Image (cartoon, rainbow, N blue to C red):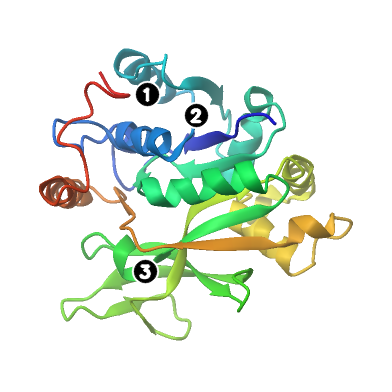
Amino acid sequence: MTEPSLLILAAGRARRYGGIKPLAPIGPNGEAVIDLLAHDAVTAGFTRIAIVLNDTTGPLIKDHIEQHWDLDQVAVDFAVQDEPHGTVHAVLAASEVISGSAFAVSNADDLYGPAALAHLYRHLTERPGENAMVAFQLERTLVGSSPVTRGVCHIDAQGGLVGIDERRGVHRGADGVIAVDDGFTPAVLSPTLRVSMNLWAFSAGMWTVFERALAEHDFATGEVLLPVVVDHLIHGTMTGVDEALRSISVYTSDEHCVGVTHPGDLELVQGHIKDEVALGNRAKALSGSLYR
């Protein structure tokens, strides 16, 4: 079996953040988000990483990685998403470098923790023909009070995903209550709800599903997004798909999933990482491991 890859989606334009989010310096010694993410992936067992870039910020991210990562420890491939057509399009941009194998997908500006990534590494090595995702507690995915979008997961008694509700304008108020400003109900969310943070494991059979989804999509309606394609699969609205691909196993993680969405998030995330180091949950420095 081909060693599974972690596919990191780093082609976003970061309009709300105003900078290159994967390179945001959140580590105790200024290490970037993508540095800590890769370190967690290697800790979880991944030895292959593919990174999808755009043609504007991509060269800077690629230069950073080549300067700072020990590429003897992890094999890294790069791909370019030439147009901002969504996360499915970004995944397909890496099809040649991953060579049609089973793979995991993550954002480049979120830090999921090694335990969450280890769920997917084990899944891909033990059950490579099945799809999966990791869900986090909502309260442990919020940084500050700025509004964000979260996919609320519906999970059955067998641990399978049966639906995702995208909620926009999710924020924590001054009273600690998590509210939503998207006009839908409920307008207040439980802090322990399980949400998707775009951390997936996909079997090799999904490459043709993604190609079909892209070919059939009307771009006048927006981008082609991974959660939308997954929703079509589990609800049977995409016909002619192998039944095994319609099931999405859900692994749950109680780790914090933090990232930089808004400019004010940077200082908050830096503080969180500093606290994690003080608690012994993260190393004081990445130098001497993957990072140099």
Give the left or right position of residue 33, taking residue 275 as reference.
right
| Direction right: furthest residue | 240
Give the labeled residue for mark 1: 61
Residue for point 29% across, 18% down: 68
Q: Which mark is residue 51?
A: 2
Q: Earlier in the sequence, mark 3 or mark 2?
A: 2
Residue for point 29% across, 47% down: 260
Q: Are marks 3 and 2 in contact (CB under 8 Å)?
A: no
Kind of residue indicated by mark 2: Ile
- Disc nearest the viewer among 2 and 1: 2
Is residue 86 visible in the rendered structure shown here? Answer: no
Give the labeled residue for mark 3: 138
Q: Earlier in the sequence, mark 1 or mark 3?
A: 1
Residue for point 16% across, 76% down: 174
Q: Are marks 2 and 1 in contact (CB under 8 Å)?
A: yes
Q: Earlier in the sequence, mark 2 or mark 1?
A: 2
Q: Which mark is residue 106?
A: none
